[in-house]
Amino acid sequence: MILEIILVLVMLVAAVSAGTFKNLLNAVIAAGFVSFIAAILFFLLNAPDVAMAEASIGAALTVAIFVIALKKTKRHEDDEKNS
Amino acid sequence: MIYYIGAIGLIIIGLYIVLTKRNLIKVIIGLDIFETGIFILLVCTGYIKGGTAPIFSKDKLNPSLMVDPIPQALVLTAIVIGVATLALALSLVIRLYRHYGTLDVRKIKELKW
Amino acid sequence: MRKIVSLILLAILLSGVIFCLTEIPFGRSLSKVREYYIDNGIKDTGATNIVTSVVVNYRGFDTLGEVTVLFLAAIGLSAVLHQEEKKPKKEGRKSSLILYTGCRFLFPLTMLFGAYIFIHGHLTPGGGFQGGAIIASGFLLTMLGCWKWRGINKSAAKITESIGGLVFVVIGLLGLLYSGYFLANYLPKGLPNELFSAGIIPIIYVAIGFKVGAELTGVLDRLIEEP
């Protein structure tokens, strides 16, 4: 019970910080961390097939595709002023 | 009960990022977080307290305490379709950057119709 | 201005969702279809993994639609990123000896693990999609760490992907020929918990494993290589 509360709180903090980072590489790594904690929650909900799919596809391949796209667009910073 | 709060929290945060951020790659990151929240919401409607995974490994398991297998099959399909959508969206973003030189949504407004 | 309007909309959505979710109890059985699938799963299909029998046998047509959507996304990505003139490719940085040896050592072990997962899809948790993603991760490892290799053989990836899709459709049409409806389970079911059991389910999962692995490898290769 206490394990699930800690995991859900860490996941929500990571999701909020993925929206507020200015450096796009840090935001992508935070989104991959959200997928990784979701895979652990799927295992605690007794769904091993879904946990394996989310860990291999959501946490590994999604981050790889994002990093390759970041390299092509050459944008490390979100450098427009927010109004 | 805590799983419901986590799933709805992820959905709200993902929708907020899609609606208010103006860098295109941040919008796609918000889409990814939103989809992960929906998957957790679907799987935790099939949970039974004290249940086990729906696999008959040895023939002595009690079949009335197994977790619902139908939402798991739907979420398996949805995860794969989610990554396909993400790859196609990122290829469109790369093409836009090559043409306009910027990734700000307010500056890409040259629709001629 | 945009932030205030979106916060108001999200507050309305949140109150609506909370009002609906307090009606749904957490942790109790809610549907009767679940009892049918768990009680008659082994008798109808012969597979001991109930999620696999739902994905491939009871709802096999949805899996065919998903394979089609994945195929369309790969084709769309290749079409959008097409370039008429080829710029000369500059040499990347050479990786160190430890990284090169480690990648060369891990590549066959990763292939073996991915193949184990999609072959035993009807007995243990796993299946075609998970095994295909692991195989694509193995190929990504060689693309990043082994600088001496010349890249993926593109025609081999395309032929493997096409043959995987064709095997799925041909097995479905043979089911139409033998038993009267598309994707019928016409091969003998065998004993549960054996490797050669459950009719057409292991054959379809092997075809899906090959197809998804080749497709994701092609997508990653197409994204990395163009300048």
Image (cartoon, coloured by chain):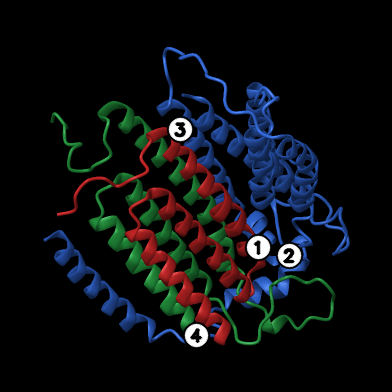
At 69% from the left and 79% from the top, the residue drawn is B52
Give the amino acid at mark 2: Asn
- Dot 3, crowdedness within 10 Å: few (<14), some or many (≥20)? many
Circle nearer the N terminus (3, 4): 4
- Dot 2, crowdedness within 10 Å: few (<14), some or many (≥20)? many
At 45% from the left and 58% from the top, the residue drawn is A31
Q: Give me the chain that's green.
A: B
Q: Which residue is mark 2?
A: C49
| Closer to the camera in the image, C184 or C106 | C106
Residue C68 sits above or below residue B54 on the image: above
- Dot 4, crowdedness within 10 Å: few (<14), some or many (≥20)? some
Q: Is residue A8 left or right of residue C199?
A: left
Give the amino acid at mark 1: Asp
Q: Give me the chain that's blue.
A: C
Give the amino acid at mark 3: Leu
Q: Which mark is residue C26?
A: 4
Label 3 – label 4 distance at C-alpha? 41 Å
The N terminus of chain C is located in which quarter?
Answer: bottom left
Q: Which residue is mark 1?
A: A49
| Closer to the camera in the image, A77 or A53 | A77
Name the element at disc 4.
Answer: loop
The answer to whether tags 2 and 1 share a subunit is no
Location of residue C83 in the rendering, given as x and y in whole percent from the top left corner: 42, 19
> Does the residue at mark 3 contact the one at mark 1 (Cβ under 8 Å)?
no
> Does the residue at mark 2 contact the one at mark 1 (Cβ under 8 Å)?
yes
Label 2 – label 1 distance at C-alpha? 10 Å
> Does the residue at mark 3 contact the one at mark 4 (Cβ under 8 Å)?
no
Give the foreground label among 2 and 1. Answer: 1
Q: Which residue is mark 3?
A: C77
